Image (cartoon, rainbow, N blue to C red):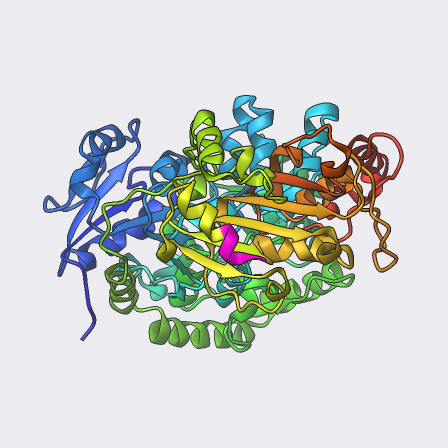
């Protein structure tokens, strides 16, 4: 028996929005409604939804926000795509855990819309830092300072970490996407195939010539179609080039681009003119559902080439295959998971253009070849993409969500911490006579927040550190987990913490400093706070210890760089002891360097460049700027 929740709140655009995700969810609603009350939240400027049953509650975002806590214990489902129509839901998604349906693994454009597109370069830099750590910061700074933004940067930097972090559970349509998300550390990822549209069954392949007549397409030539938005990544130019060469050989055809143009991104009309195919190409513009299905069934085969891929699973492709059409795809990402006998797959390599031309010619001339693929595809979709099965899987995943009225902020990466008043620390020190405490900087400088629900304490003297955490900062023993610095690398990481307080020696760090701080990164939640107090056995501000086992200098500026390279932003630095005596016999002989930092990203720069002379941080940035023309976005 599959568990289903009695109610769900779904954030998703709806028809008549010209959006594939809107159509996708609208088809699911009747199946959800069989067992579950559905409330859909749309953006404030959304046109009045059409074709939605009366028993479905529709709220505009502003209406939802007025009564947000009324829905707090109801499972939330968020449909996220790399387009403006899902931007409105981000503030709720990032604060209310739920089931996030990741339709596009690459969410760069979506995140861009929230900052850079609005002129907020610093916000874009922070988003890059949250996703890619220190190197993301460098890319953002280069963009702000020099305007550098590589052509492939939006494709290579997927910018999905904040969305993934916020999700309690994630649903995707391909193993490719599940593996990519799993590699980021999210354990609750499920694969549910993109369903086949029930509306498609109203259209009959045997009416191909009737549909061609209605659409003004020729009945005596092969019709090739590319469906959906006309975007550069769909390799339309490559198809036009290949078809132009076939036309020179006397091959006849009509090529239909059945979708809306994106003139700001790609000038398809210029490529059509340059290829000499103006008489062979039909550009339809946006299609309603009726025309969409008729154009599809009027075709002899479908060209669905996508490179680079953003991890998307194509609803258009599922529909075409389910209707028995042969489809040509690039053998990459989710499309590589299609069975070999269900789609014609081209490898993206140096022979792609040549192989595309040969493949198109065979598909045009060999009817039996394309019909065989189409029949195999139809059987496979009917067996694996049934909408009753996929919607049940959605509700089953939603039923696993925690019943919680707590709204979190960890994915926003801006957790608000509470601290003691400085006088409270002074009074506690006087009352407890702890001036002789050599490792006093981390607590005497009041760097430890008092608001964390749990603390990981790392110290060679864990009892002493725990005593200060309880008696000064108010934590209970039950909230504190204890480790020694020696146990850090052997620790089996099954839990992450909002706060880590670490008291160690530079000797512990010396052999592999970035890896050592990367271990701390793994122990922290995104947005979590770490207070690192490092003993320098050789007293002196900024003086490096002499450790032959380390390939790096261990001066204070370099240690700061290592912490940043391990995915942290530095909030504060203090050196001490803070108690200074003028009596020579009691003068300190060693110094602690203490850093308060916030975890911004999982990403670690394992080989940071460190310069021993001058301003190390500025010189490191400058070195990256000098090499950026050669490396570009590869730095990420």
> In front: 87, or 227?
87
Tell me how many marks there are.
Answer: 0
* 260 to 169, vertically: above or below: above
| Residue at 41% over, 33% down | 418
Instruction: Tell me, yes or no, if residue 222 can be seen here.
Output: no
Range drawn in magenta? 461-465
307 lies left or right of 427: right
Location of residue 275 in the rendering, given as x and y in whole percent from the top left corner: 70, 43
* 150 to 470, vertically: above or below: above
50 lies left or right of 379: left
112 lies left or right of 438: left
Kindly indicate the quadrant of the structure image that contains residue 461. Answer: bottom right
Kindly indicate the quadrant of the structure image that contains residue 318. Answer: bottom left
Location of residue 586 in the rendering, given as x and y in whole percent from the top left corner: 71, 38
Location of residue 427 in the rendering, given as x and y in whole percent from the top left corner: 44, 30
| Residue at 35% over, 66% down | 206
> In front: 536, or 36?
536
Q: Specify the quadrant that holds the N terminus.
A: bottom left
635 lies left or right of 382: right
Q: Is residue 464 magenta?
A: yes
């Amino acid at each position: 028996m599959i568990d289903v929740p009695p109610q769900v709140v779904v954030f998703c655009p709806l028809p008549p929005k010209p959006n594939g995700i809107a159509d996708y969810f609208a088809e699911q609603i009747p199946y959800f409604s069989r067992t579950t009350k559905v409330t859909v939240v749309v953006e404030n400027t959304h046109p009045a939804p059409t074709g939605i049953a009366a028993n479905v509650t529709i709220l505009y975002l502003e209406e939802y926000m007025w009564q947000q806590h009324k829905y707090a214990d109801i499972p939330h489902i968020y449909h996220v795509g790399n387009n403006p129509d899902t931007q409105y839901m981000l503030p709720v998604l990032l604060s209310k855990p739920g089931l996030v349906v990741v339709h596009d693994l690459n969410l760069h454009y979506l995140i861009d819309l929230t900052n850079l597109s609005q002129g907020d370069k610093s916000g874009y830099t922070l988003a890059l830092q949250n996703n890619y750590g220190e190197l993301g910061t460098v890319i953002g700074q280069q963009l702000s300072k020099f305007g550098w933004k590589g052509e492939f940067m939006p494709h290579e930097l997927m910018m999905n970490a904040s969305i993934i972090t916020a999700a309690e559970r994630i649903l995707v349509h391909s193993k490719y996407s599940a593996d990519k998300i799993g590699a980021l550390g999210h354990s609750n990822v499920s694969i549910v195939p993109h369903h086949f549209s029930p509306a498609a069954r109203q259209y009959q392949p045997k009416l191909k010539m009737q549909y061609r007549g209605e659409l003004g397409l020729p009945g005596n030539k092969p019709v090739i179609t590319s469906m959906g938005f006309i975007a550069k990544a769909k390799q339309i130019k490559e198809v036009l080039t290949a078809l132009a060469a076939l036309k020179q050989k006397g091959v006849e055809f009509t090529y239909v681009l059945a979708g809306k143009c994106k003139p700001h991104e790609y000038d398809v009309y210029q490529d059509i003119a340059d290829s000499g195919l103006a008489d062979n190409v039909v550009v339809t513009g946006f299609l309603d559902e009726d025309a969409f299905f008729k154009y599809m069934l009027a075709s002899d085969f479908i060209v669905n080439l996508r490179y680079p891929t953003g991890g998307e699973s194509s609803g258009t492709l599922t529909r075409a295959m389910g209707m028995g059409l042969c489809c040509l795809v690039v053998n990459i990402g989710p499309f590589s998971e299609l069975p070999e006998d269900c789609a014609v797959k081209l490898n993206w390599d140096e022979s792609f253009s040549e192989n595309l031309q040969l493949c198109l010619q065979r598909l045009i001339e060999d009817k039996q070849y394309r019909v065989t693929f189409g029949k195999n595809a139809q059987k496979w979709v009917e067996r694996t993409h049934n909408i009753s099965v996929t919607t049940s899987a959605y509700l089953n995943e939603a039923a696993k969500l925690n019943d919680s009225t707590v709204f979190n902020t960890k994915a926003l990466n801006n957790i608000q911490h509470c601290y003691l008043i400085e006088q409270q620390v002074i009074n506690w020190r006087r009352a407890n006579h702890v001036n002789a405490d050599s490792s006093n900087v981390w607590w005497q400088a009041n760097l430890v927040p008092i608001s964390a629900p749990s603390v990981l304490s790392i110290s060679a003297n864990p009892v002493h550190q725990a005593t200060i955490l309880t008696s000064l900062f108010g934590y209970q023993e039950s909230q504190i987990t204890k480790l020694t610095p020696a146990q850090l690398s052997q620790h089996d990481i099954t839990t992450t913490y909002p706060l880590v307080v670490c008291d160690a020696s530079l000797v512990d760090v010396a052999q592999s400093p970035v890896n050592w701080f990367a271990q701390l990164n793994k122990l922290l939640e995104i947005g979590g706070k770490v207070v690192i107090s490092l003993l320098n056995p050789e007293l002196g501000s900024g003086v490096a210890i002499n450790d032959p086992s380390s390939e790096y200098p261990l001066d204070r500026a370099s240690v700061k760089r290592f912490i940043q390279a391990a995915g942290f932003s530095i909030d504060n630095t203090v050196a001490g002891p803070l108690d200074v005596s003028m009596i020579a016999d009691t003068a300190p002989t060693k110094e602690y360097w203490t850093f308060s930092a916030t975890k911004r990203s999982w990403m670690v720069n394992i080989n940071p460049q460190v310069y021993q002379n001058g301003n190390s941080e500025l010189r490191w940035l400058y070195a990256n700027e000098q090499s950026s023309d050669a490396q570009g976005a590869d730095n990420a």
